[in-house]
Image (cartoon, rainbow, N blue to C red):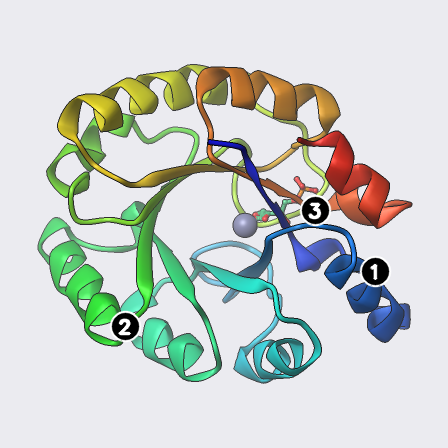
Amino acid sequence: MSVLIAPSVLSLDYSDTASQLQQLNASGAEWMHYDVMDGNFVPNISFGPDILKAFCKASPLYKDVHLMVADPSYYADVFIKAGADLITFHYEALQEEEIRPLLEKIHAAGKKAGISIKPNTDVEVLVPYLNEVDLILIMSVEPGFGGQSFHPEAAGKIAQLRQMIDASGSHALIEVDGGINQETGRVCREAGVDVLVAGSYVFKGDIQKAVESLR
Ligand code: DX5
Ligand code: ZN
């Protein structure tokens, strides 16, 4: 399968939003990665549901919502209502017994569900959920800010997860997020990733060229 590209609008130039969104729509990217930060699960605040609603009007791209929030169960409903196609929440934000009910709630709303792990969380924690999730997001930086450097250990986690997914018969996609550019994107593709998130790399210059260079 060829890789899907998910530019992170966290790095969009908000002084020029309309033009940036037009360029993104024409870039060939399949997904829009939308980072929600609550100033609690991570030490930063990004945007809420109204901006997502506006982006749904302005862009046909698949809305990949990454919840970096302490209460993902509450905010899953909020962002589904605002237009999310896929809701990914953090394993670390919940108690183990809260994970399956949230996956079920997202699926009951007709949306896709993903689980993300931070750099210090082992992929083995995901074993019980491999056949219940649509996507697993490997964070290759500490969540909270764009523009950080890729943690090379993420490539090993992707390769390990690739084997686990293929052996289990799961259809979950593997996504990686943080410090992705042409070089680190290639490393992740070789490790078996399905979806590349990239923020600062895509929005620093020519959006279409950057998207093409990630394939
Ligand atoms: C970081 C966010 C990322 C961020 C990536 O916490 O989850 O999606 O936008 O930005 P870059 O690609 O600049 O590392
Ligand atoms: Zn993200």
View extreme (front): residue = 1
Question: Neighbour class for label 1 at 10 Å: few (<14), some, many (≥20)?
Answer: some
* Image depth: mark 2 or mark 3 in front: 2
Name the amino acid, label 3: Gly
Instruction: Compare marks 3 and 1 and give the one earlier in the sequence.
Output: 1
Q: Is residue 65 above or below residue 79?
A: above
- The residue that appears at 68% across and 35% down in the rendered structure is 148
> With 19 as the anchor, is 144 left or right in this view?
left
Q: Is residue 189 above or below residue 36?
A: above
What residue sits right under mark 1 in the picture?
Answer: 23
Ligand 1 closer than 8 Å to label 3 CB = yes
Q: Position of residue 202 (x, y in %)?
A: 77, 44
> Residue 57 — which label?
none
Residue 34 sits in quarter: bottom right
Q: Position of residue 29 (x, y in %)?
A: 67, 50
> Residue 199 — which label?
3
Determine whether label 2 and label 3 are within 8 Å by CB: no
Q: Position of residue 104 (x, y in %)?
A: 16, 65
- The CA span between labels 3 and 1 is 14 Å
Under circle 1, the secondary element is: helix
Name the amino acid, label 1: Gln
Nearer to the camera, 131 or 50: 131
Instruction: Compare marks 2 and 3 and give the one earlier in the sequence.
Output: 2
Question: Neighbour class for label 2 at 10 Å: few (<14), some, many (≥20)?
Answer: few
Residue 36 in view in this figure: no
Q: Is residue 25 above or below residue 59?
A: above
* Image depth: mark 3 or mark 1 in front: 1
What residue sits right under mark 2 in the picture?
Answer: 110
